[in-house]
Image (cartoon, rainbow, N blue to C red):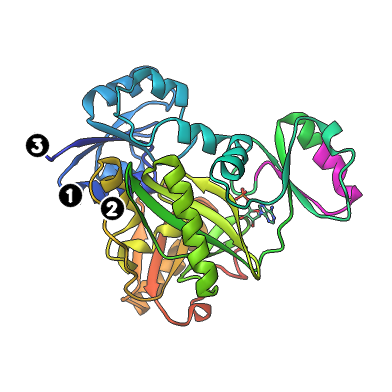
Amino acid sequence: MSSTKTIGIIGGGQLGQMMAISAIYMGHKVITLDPASDCPSSRVSEVIAAPYDDVDALRQLADRCDVLTYEFENVDADGLDAVIKDGQLPQGTELLRISQNRIFEKDFLSNKAQVTVAPYKVVTSSLDLEDIDLSKNYVLKTATGGYDGHGQKVITSAEDLEEANALANSAECVLEEFVNFDLEISVIVSGNGKDVTVFPVQENIHRNNILSKTIVPARISDRLADRAKAIAVKIAEQLNLSGTLCVEMFATADDIIVNEIAPRPHNSGHYSIEACDFSQFDTHILGVLGAPLPAINLHEPAVMLNVLGQHVEAAERYVTENPSAHLHMYGKLEAKHNRKMGHMTLFSNEPDNVVEFGKGIDF
Ligand code: AMP
C-alpha cells in the first residue's frame, strides 16, 4: 500500500492552507472544498468550489480522498455523516457537534472530561435570568453561532439585563460566571487515536476580541503550566483525539479554568511552525493519518503577532528592517479591516518589547 494519501480538507482559509503545506511536505496530495475558488488553499491545492453544505460536493470530496479533515468547526455534521465511509474522518462528527454548541461543550468538559469550567447554567429564555445573583458578574453566550465575542453579553449590573434578556429570548444560551483571570492561555494537543502529544502553553492577548499576540512560553508558574498541559491531555484522551485540538483557558492566581475547545489547529499555535521542531499542522496531518506523533520541543521563546487588514503595510515594513522575523501572508486578495491577512513569528526573550501591529493606532 502506498504511504502517499489524498487528503480532503473542508475549508480553504489560512488554516486549511497551512495544513495542506504540511501534508505536501510529507508527500501527500490535497483537495480542498471551499466556496471560493481563489481561497488561500488554492495556492497549494486543487479546490472544489462549492458551499460547505453542498452534499454532492462533499460526496465528490469523500470519493476522491483517502482521509477527510476540516479547518473549522461549523461544518455540517449531518451532511458529512451522509457521505463519509467508515474511518474516513478520523476526527469524527461527535467532536464537531460538541464544539458547535456551548451547551454540549460545557457538558462534555465538566461531566465527561471532568475539568474545571466557570460555573454556568443553561438559559432557554429571559425567565432563567430572573433570579440571578447580581452581586456576581456574568457572561451570557449564545449556544451556537457565536465567535470572536459576537453573541455575548457581559452582565455586571441590572442595567445590562435588558440586552441580556433580549439575547436570552433570541437563542439558547449559557450563562457563565465572569472569571477574573490573570492571563488567557491555550494549549495545543494532537492525537492519532491512540497517543497524544502536547505543545508548550501559549499566552494570548486579544484586541477587540481578536487574537493579537501570542507569547510562548506563557508567563505562568511551572506548576500552572503543567496543570494546563495535563488538562489538555485529559480532554484529548477523553475524546480519543485524532488531529489537532486547541484548549483555550483562563489562568488565575492559583487555578486553570477551561473556556472552550477548538477541534483544529488554532491561531494561537501558529508560532509552532518556526519555534517548535514540529508544527501544529504537521501533528494534525500525522494525527489524522494515524501516524506516530513526535514529542514537541520549543527551540526558543517566541512571539506571534497577527497581521490584520489594516496592518499589512506595517508588517511588510517591519520585515525589511527585521529580516529575521518570519512573515507569513495567506494570499487573501482583499485586505479588509480586521481580516486576518497573515502573521509574524519572531524569537524574543522580551515579549513586552515586541509591539503589536496597530496597538493604540488602528484599534
Ligand atoms: P469566547 O467566545 O468564549 O472565546 O469568549 C471571547 C472572550 O471573552 C474570551 O477570550 C475572554 O476574553 C472573554 N470571556 C469569555 N468568557 C469569559 C468568562 N467566563 N469570564 C471572563 N471573560 C470571559
The magenta segment: 150-165
Quick one: SS at disc 2?
A: helix
Residue 278's disc is none
Q: Are marks 1 and 2 in contact (CB under 8 Å)?
A: yes
Residue drawn 91% across and 48% down? 158
> Can you tell which quarter of the image residue 49 is in?
top left
| Residue 67 at least partly seen | yes
Where residue 299 appears, as percent x and y from the top left, is: 31, 73
Residue drawn 42% across and 46% down? 237
- Sequence order check, earlier mark of 2 and 3: 3
Crowd class of label 2 (few under 14; some 14 to 19; many from 20; radius 10 Å): many
Residue 26's disc is 1
Quick one: SS at disc 3?
A: loop
Where residue 154 appears, as percent x and y from the top left, is: 76, 50
Of residue 160 and residue 132, the one placed in the foreground of this image is: 132
- Sequence order check, earlier mark of 1 and 2: 1
Distance from Cα at disc 2 to Cα at disc 3: 19 Å
Q: Quadrant of the C terminus?
A: bottom right
Q: Quadrant of the N terminus?
A: top left
Of residue 113 and residue 43, the one placed in the foreground of this image is: 113
Amino acid type at circle 2 is Asp
Q: Which residue is mark 3?
A: 2
Distance from Cα at disc 3 to Cα at disc 1: 13 Å
Q: Is residue 89 magenta?
A: no
Residue 282's disc is 2
Quick one: SS at disc 1?
A: loop
25 relative to 197 in the view: left or right: left
Q: Is residue 171 above or below residue 226?
A: above
Q: Is residue 161 magenta?
A: yes
Amino acid type at circle 3 is Ser
